[in-house]
Image (cartoon, grey):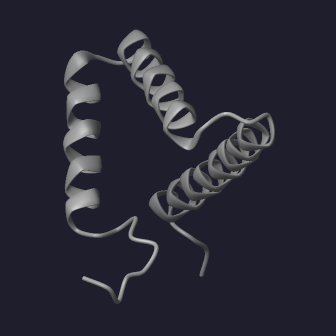
Amino acid sequence: MGQGIGQIDAMIREEKRLTAVESQTEAWAEGLSAGIEPEIIAEAALTTAFAELLRSCSEEAALTLLDVMREKVIGGDFDVNPYHH
């Protein structure tokens, strides 16, 4: 049987997410090769992301994303050494 619309939408969203991650990874590498410190790149990326989210969505969407990301940081989702908690 074919895939449902929900499954297709999920696949499209995941493909978009992967493309966005690839673009961000390339931009990060370019910044590092230009001698920009990781903290400055991160602040610029977050500032741009939240400004665009506020422009296109809402303050609530931006705050929700901030809460989700905070929980991911606390949960160790970005830990480079996941076995070192």
Q: Quadrant of residue 27?
A: top right
Q: Is residue 34 left or right of residue 59?
A: right
* Residue at (46, 29) in percent of width and height: 43
Q: Is residue 43 left or right of residue 36?
A: left
Q: Quadrant of the N terminus?
A: bottom right
Q: Quadrant of residue 47?
A: top left
Q: Note whether 5 is above or below 49 in the view shown.
A: below
* Residue at (57, 71) in percent of width and height: 3
* Residue 15 location (% of width, % of height): 65, 56
Number of numbered discs overlaid on the protein picture: 0
Which residue is outermost to the top?
A: 55
- In the image, 44 versus 55, the foreground residue is 44
* Residue 14 location (% of width, % of height): 57, 58
Q: Note whether 82 is above or below 60 in the view shown.
A: below
* Residue 62 location (% of width, % of height): 28, 27
- In the image, 6 versus 45, the foreground residue is 45
Q: Note whether 70 is above or below 7 in the view shown.
A: above
- In the image, 71 versus 10, the foreground residue is 71
* Residue 12 location (% of width, % of height): 61, 53
* Residue at (56, 42) in percent of width and height: 38
